[in-house]
Image (cartoon, helix red, strand yellow):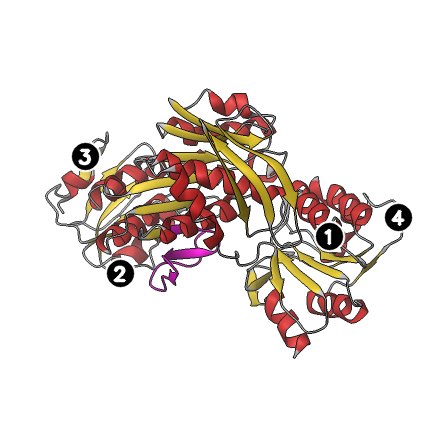
Amino acid sequence: MILSKILAGLEYELIQGDLNTEIQSINYDSRGNLKDGLFIAIIGFRTDGHSFILNALANGAKAVIIEQDIPALPTGLTIVKLKSSRKALSLIAANFYENPTKKVKLIAITGTNGKTSVSYIISSLLQSLGYKIGVIGTNGIRINDHLLEDVNKTTPTTPESLDIQHIINKMSLENVEIVIMEASSMALKLGRLDNCEISTGVFTNLSHEHLDDHGTFEDYKNSKKILFDLTSYGIINADDPYFEDFNRQSAKIISFGLDTKADLNGNNVKLLADSTELKISYIDQVIQCSIPLPGRFNIYNTLAAIGACLSIGIDFGDIINKIKFIKPIDGRTENIKNDRNLKIIIDYAHTPNALKNVMETLKAITIGRLITVFGCGGNRDKEKRPKMGNIATQIADYVILTNDNPRYEDPKIIVNEIINGITTENYKIILDRKEAINTALEMAQEDDIILIAGKGSEEYQTVQGVNIPFSDKQTVLDYLK
């Protein structure tokens, strides 16, 4: 594609070169594929892409987009200047890949908790109905149940806009009909979903988290709301305190909730150890069903998923008939089977609300003791640490405090900040996460429940900028051998 077509719709200044330059690849990483390519210099949070232009040229780039003047660049190179490379990236990507989001139905999910679970439940329902599905989120990028190995696995929850367009283009070429994507607040704020044609936006819930990224709760909330300016259909949690803030954003709304006047309503709930029985009503239909997932929070996740399926034209009865096929979600209330009559649960809960929800669910079905292993991530919202310490020790019978991606912080300082919220003595500190998990398993007796919280299906521990291989699940399996 020639450069002028890639830049269509943007205001720019041609510094030198030819807009008819043929471009075969685009990248914002000077180390990536740039053969006959366009390098986009973005000023990032830690590095400035302008410092790597010569690296990009050595890697095959023949055109560069800049947003600040660079002296003494080689002649023969096409250089285009924009006001903001980052803001332009989404449109550049959409142009280059010829708007792949128009070739699929795109469902985007935002909220403090539940994004991954909702995306998996939607995927499970739609696959059971015969659709070919793409999923982009925390647990990776996949088509149906096949994890894609040839895409960037180091991307965050929501990839950069160029990666989103590349991934969805790849999915479209493989005849994917519906793509389900987690939309983080920072991705929305940074415009990564701009120039995507989104069929449906889903709002799960909102609580005071991630203020380390946003500074204020208002900025966090407003960043989430951006999704509903990008879509014409919204699936909104009517029981959330911030329902009205999101209810105003989309032209069409399906609200969901429990024992409310929501459009999609769950009632007569019976919580069981590994499932939930309830009636679900929509318009004039009421159907009794069983959700093969435990916990009240998973009712909300399932209702959100049902709403998303309804929004793209699927019959209510057909959806409900497939609920029994919902698959367990890796790292989300994942039950590790064993022959010791223990219930060993691995869960991603890493916020106060998520930890409280999963612990209350487990406490309600605990015959023996509830033993919880958890920690808090380094270089993240410090305000949640004492809150989580208080929640864990108030609900659990015993708590082991440990490491959870300390990053660049001192693990001892993190744990001490957790302890600031603890008023009981039913805890101990074991910073080594493997030792902490093994200790919990050693002290457990028949009918106890062990909750290992915070990392879910993550396969690494981040220490001083290095991802060290580590898996909660594998640690448990190794112990049980």
In the rendered structure, the answer to whether residue 441 lies left or right of residue 132 reads right
Q: Where is residue 443 in the image (x, y as percent from the top left)?
A: 81, 68
Sequence-first disc among 2 and 1? 2
Sequence-first disc among 4 and 1? 1
In the rendered structure, the answer to whether residue 69 lies left or right of residue 266 reads left
Which amino acid, by three-letter code, is at mark 4?
Answer: Thr
Residue under label 4: 424
Q: Where is residue 308 in the image (x, y as percent from the top left)?
A: 41, 38
Q: Which residue is drawn at 18% across and 56% down?
A: 36
Residue under label 1: 365
Residue under label 3: 8
**In front of the other: label 4 or label 1?**
1
Instruction: Give 407 or 346, whichever is nearer the viewer.
Output: 346
Which amino acid, by three-letter code, is at mark 2?
Answer: Ala
Q: How far apart are marks 1 and 3 (CA)?
A: 58 Å
Which amino acid, by three-letter code, is at mark 3?
Answer: Ala
Residue under label 2: 58
| Crowd class of label 2 (few under 14; some 14 to 19; many from 20; radius 10 Å) | few
Q: Which residue is drawn at 46% across and 50% down?
A: 120
Sequence-first disc among 2 and 4? 2
Up-down relation of residue 350 to residue 259 (above or below): below
The stretch in magenta equals 135-155
| Crowd class of label 1 (few under 14; some 14 to 19; many from 20; radius 10 Å) | some
Up-down relation of residue 257 to residue 470 (above or below): above
> Residue reaching furthest left?
20
Which amino acid, by three-letter code, is at mark 1?
Answer: Ile
Up-down relation of residue 234 to residue 415 (above or below): above
Q: Quadrant of the C terminus?
A: bottom right
Find residue 148 and report its image quarter.
Answer: bottom left
Tally the numbered discs: 4
